[in-house]
Amino acid sequence: DADVTQTPRNRITKTGKRIMLECSQTKGHDRMYWYRQDPGLGLRLIYYSFDVKDINKGEISDGYSVSRQAQAKFSLSLESAIPNQTALYFCATSDHRGHAYEQYFGPGTRLTVT
Amino acid sequence: GNSVTQMEGPVTLSEEAFLTINCTYTATGYPSLFWYVQYPGEGLQLLLKATKADDKGSNKGFEATYRKETTSFHLEKGSVQVSDSAVYFCALRGGSNYKLTFGKGTLLTVNP
């Protein structure tokens, strides 16, 4: 079974709709992240959370919100979706212990806003 | 701030060819460096890492050496296979900063 799961894997929605992307992990990591991937731009950080009570904005947080419901769950919401939020969204986790803090990624959610 | 520049693709090679994907970085302090790979339809997987100067990361026949003097972390493989076709991302984590900074990715296609 995958250590980091994301639901849904694909979603098509209309402009103005509210949608939620969910992420769950079984790695026991304390840190979780949301990224978006756009062609030619690499990955950009939307939000990150170091524990359940710690939520922080990343470089492109406008138009998004998050909720850390438990150590293992981190949800991303688009309050009112717009077409330029069409992208591939990834959740990632890491463990604060250890030097390199490498991140482990989920399979991604492909979101299309029409 | 931190930044990563990697060679633009796409890169197209024949099977058994030698691969180099260039990556250079700008960072304060002593960053950790990573290569991630994204196979079609999948998320990113950590391919290899290096945490200090002159370290060599290796995995699945891929290698990269952390060169502080040239601020580089080039990815190499001596003989690529069709199954290596993927997008490769260079990334760094700078000092005490939690945040990963990614390059834009390089698409590699290996033909039989």
Image: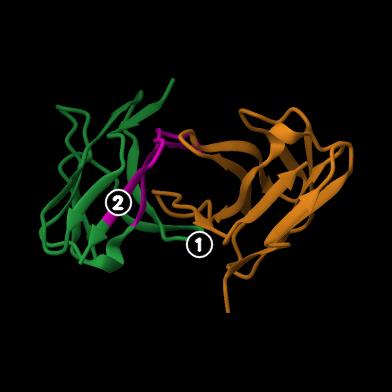
Chain colours: A orange, B green
Q: Residues within 10 Å of mark 1 (few under 14, many from 20)?
A: some
User: In the rendering, at what x and y percent does residue A99 appear?
Assistant: 39, 49
Which quadrant holds the C terminus of chain A?
Answer: top right
Along the line of sight, the residue nearer the viewer: A54 or B47: B47
User: In the rendering, at what x and y percent does residue A30 appear?
Assistant: 63, 55
The residue wearing badge 2 is B108
Q: Label 1 sits on what residue type?
A: Glu
Q: Main secondary structure of the magenta part?
A: strand
User: Relative to residue B96, is residue B30 drawn left or right?
Assistant: left
Q: Label 2 sits on what residue type?
A: Leu
Residue B65 is drawn in which quadrant? top left
User: Relative to residue A31, is residue B60 drawn left or right?
Assistant: left
Q: Which residues are magenta?
A: B86-109
Residue located farthest toward the top when viewing the structure as drawn: B1
The residue wearing badge 1 is B42
Identify which residue is drawn at 89% across, 42% down.
A17
Badge 1: chain ID: B
